[in-house]
Image (cartoon, helix red, strand yellow):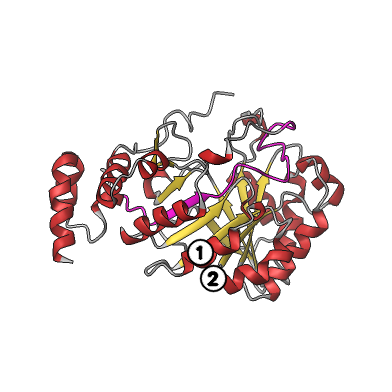
């Protein structure tokens, strides 16, 4: 531990502003994963693939997107190498994302290898649920202990319209399978879009009555190819007002400081609901997340354009010490919040 501290202190000379902050405040956390605003990044999201077996209207164009050649994507071993490095520096939670992570053939093996990393407390996955029922028993055995399932409607025909594919019943089967296998809670991600599904808010709340779910209503956000505009966004406060008209006894729950969700519960319901207020009330100030794209780029902000290729450094033979320095420099450049994202235009 002493040698590690000396190494970190030496490295801080190259990151002077952040270094002074860390030394002054004696942060008991990795210097390399702490930015100049004191945010400690202990949560890493890793994209396993760019591919997806759905074509959700708010996510990508109907024709799909141009995919990166397979040779340029991270291999399973490269993913584990980078994950081990981040966990060694203090990352406690890793979430596997995509595209759709469960279409990657070696996903169960990747989860199993992550489970062996000492210090990693949570291995999570965000999935569209299409392949979940088939894979979940093996994923659970491998060490997966948290699940987010995307579901934007409880109406089968509307599901097909939104995702441009069939599969509603497979997703519902996956949700029930997750509860049967003991996942508590099973998080259900619902992107709320005006003119699409804002009329289903009460149905989703009722969905939590007899199942241990956390239905997370997500404010519609900009994304390449989704033809985003503010008119489609339903704000957290508008959603909350609608729900409280039906359930005025709705209780607010306490959340961790770094949580992106504002959580509520209808008394006597098994599950709960949450709101992800990415647009109306951003949570940049408590952001503890970093992202690695499927082709190995480190993104310190979901909406930021700045990326550094960890894959290229890894394949060129960079040492662990050099990789940590590169990661630390990228985290040090992280901005206070993503510029321009929250400037709501005048009506």
Q: Is residue 61 above or below residue 192?
A: above
Question: Where are the magenta residues, as a range?
Answer: 38-63
Taking the image as shown, residue 88 lies to the left or right of residue 231, namely left
Residue occupying the far top of the picture = 346
| Residue 46 part of the magenta segment | yes
Q: Is residue 304 above or below residue 91?
A: above
**Residue 101 percent coordinates (x, y):** 61, 52
**Residue 169 percent coordinates (x, y):** 82, 58
Q: Report the magenta stretch's main SS.
A: loop
**Residue 283 percent coordinates (x, y):** 44, 46
Q: What is the crowding at mark 2: few (fewer than 14 residues within 10 Å), some, or many (at least 20)?
A: some
Taking the image as shown, residue 302 lies to the left or right of residue 84, namely right
Q: Is residue 131 above or below residue 140?
A: above
Residue occupying the far right of the picture = 157
Contact, mark 1 vs mark 2 (Cβ under 8 Å): yes
| Residue 58 part of the magenta segment | yes
Residue that carries the numbered disc 1 in the rendered image: 123
Asked if residue 233 shows in the view, the reply is yes
Q: What is the secondary structure assignment of the residue under circle 1?
A: strand
Residue at left offset 79%, top offset 59%: 170
Residue at left offset 51%, top offset 50%: 75
Taking the image as shown, residue 36 lies to the left or right of residue 95, namely left
**Residue 71 percent coordinates (x, y):** 54, 40
Residue that carries the numbered disc 2 in the rendered image: 143
Residue at left offset 72%, top offset 49%: 152
Of the pair 246 and 93, the residue shown nearer to us? 93
């Amino acid at each position: 531990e002493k040698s590690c501290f000396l190494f970190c202190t030496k490295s801080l000379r190259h990151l002077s502003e952040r270094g002074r902050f860390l030394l002054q405040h004696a942060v008991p956390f990795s210097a390399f994963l702490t930015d100049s605003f004191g945010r400690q990044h202990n949560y890493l999201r890793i994209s396993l693939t760019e591919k997806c077996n759905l074509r959700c209207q708010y996510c990508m164009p109907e024709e799909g997107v141009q995919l990166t050649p397979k040779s340029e994507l991270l291999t399973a071993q490269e993913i584990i190498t980078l994950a081990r490095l981040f966990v060694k520096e203090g990352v406690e939670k890793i979430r596997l994302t995509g595209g759709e992570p469960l279409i990657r053939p070696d996903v169960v093996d990747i989860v199993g290898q992550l489970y062996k990393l000492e210090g990693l407390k949570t291995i999570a996955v965000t999935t569209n649920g299409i392949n979940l029922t088939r894979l979940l028993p093996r994923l659970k055995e491998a060490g997966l202990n948290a699940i987010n399932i995307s579901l934007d409607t409880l109406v089968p025909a509307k599901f097909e319209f939104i995702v441009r594919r069939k599969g509603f019943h497979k997703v519902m089967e996956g949700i029930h399978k997750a509860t049967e296998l003991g996942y508590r809670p099973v998080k259900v991600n619902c992107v709320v879009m005006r003119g699409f599904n804002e009329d289903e808010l009460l149905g989703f709340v009722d969905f939590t009555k007899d199942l241990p779910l956390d239905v997370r209503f997500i404010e519609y956000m900009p994304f390449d190819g989704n033809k985003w505009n503010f008119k489609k966004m339903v704000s957290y406060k508008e959603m909350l007002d609608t729900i409280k008209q039906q359930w005025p006894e709705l209780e607010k729950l306490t959340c961790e400081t770094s949580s992106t969700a504002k959580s509520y519960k209808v008394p006597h319901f098994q599950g709960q609901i949450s709101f992800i207020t990415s647009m109306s009330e951003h949570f940049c100030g408590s952001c503890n997340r970093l992202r690695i794209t499927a082709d190995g780029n480190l993104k310190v902000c979901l909406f930021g354009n700045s990326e550094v290729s960890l894959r290229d450094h890894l394949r060129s033979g960079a040492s662990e010490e050099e990789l940590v320095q590169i990661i630390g420099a990228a985290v040090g450049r992280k901005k206070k919040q993503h510029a321009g994202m929250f400037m709501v235009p005048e009506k």
